[in-house]
Amino acid sequence: MSTAAQPDLQPGRAYRTRDLRRWSANPTRLAKRLVREGKLHQAAHGLFYAPVPSRFGPAPPEETEILRAFFAGSPFIISGPPRWNALGLGATAIFAATLVYNTRRTGEFTFDGRRYLLRRVLFPENPPPEYFVVDLIQHRDMAGVSVAELEERLVATLKQGRWDRELLHEMAERYGTKATLALVERCLSAAGEAP
């Protein structure tokens, strides 16, 4: 293959250098050329994306697309304040970095100027809201919410029928610490029904 080949890049798609091998025997050189031509933007070392045309100029892809390419198809989920605050359990946290659970890497990374805090942990494939309740309990210090406030709000929302009680208990058993499980069981009991 020649490095003169014109790759068929999809706007909004992220690529690793190795993904460019289908168009060139020297994917690193091809990536550099495509960046110079503005057809690719570099998000991090060895990670690129084809910008999305917009009326304001070239735009980056969705962050999930950058993460998909970075993790090379391995599972990941985005957690943290956007998930926790939406639960209505008292969390109002804001982070400067996006919290991402995955099966490969732990550390802080920057992709296209955005910071990501990667944690290698166990998580369900399609996490239900009850998983994020357990996740919030586990990270209450990071979320800036007290145990007392969490318990009070969790009991109230359980009484309102917002959560699947059995699933909440299962998520706490499978993904929580003993202290988290104990808190969930206290709340279930206080709400009038234990699993």
Image: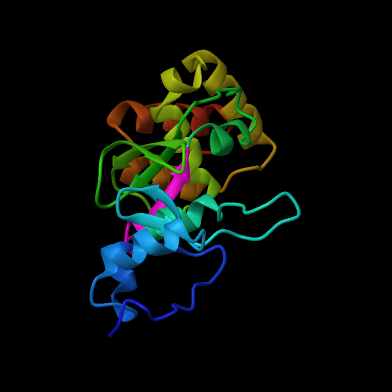
Report whether 63 appears left or right of 135: right
In the picture shown, does residue 176 fall above or below 74? above
Q: Residue furthest right?
A: 55
Residue at 33% of width from left, 71% of height from top?
A: 20
> Where residue 104 appears, x then y in whole percent?
24, 51
Residue at 50% of width from left, 26% of height from top?
A: 95
> Where residue 36 appears, x then y in whole percent?
44, 57
**Residue 19 visible, this angle:** yes
> Observer-nearest residue: 61 or 137?
61
In the picture shown, does residue 39 fall above or below 118? below
Report whether 121 appears left or right of 94: left
Q: Total label count?
A: 0
Quadrant placement of the N terminus: bottom left
Residue at 33% of width from left, 40% of height from top?
A: 118
Residue at 43% of width from left, 57% of height from top?
A: 35
Q: Residue furthest bottom?
A: 1
**Residue 75 visible, this angle:** no
> Where residue 107 appears, x then y in whole percent?
27, 35
Does residue 166 show up magenta in the picture? Answer: no
> Observer-nearest residue: 177 or 124?
124
> Where residue 194 appears, x then y in whole percent?
48, 39
Name the quadrant containing residue 34: bottom left
Report whether 183 appears left or right of 148: left
Way the structure is coloured: rainbow
Bounds of the magenta span? 70-79
Report whether 66 appears left or right of 191: left
> Observer-nearest residue: 68 or 87?
68
> Observer-nearest residue: 9 or 170?
9
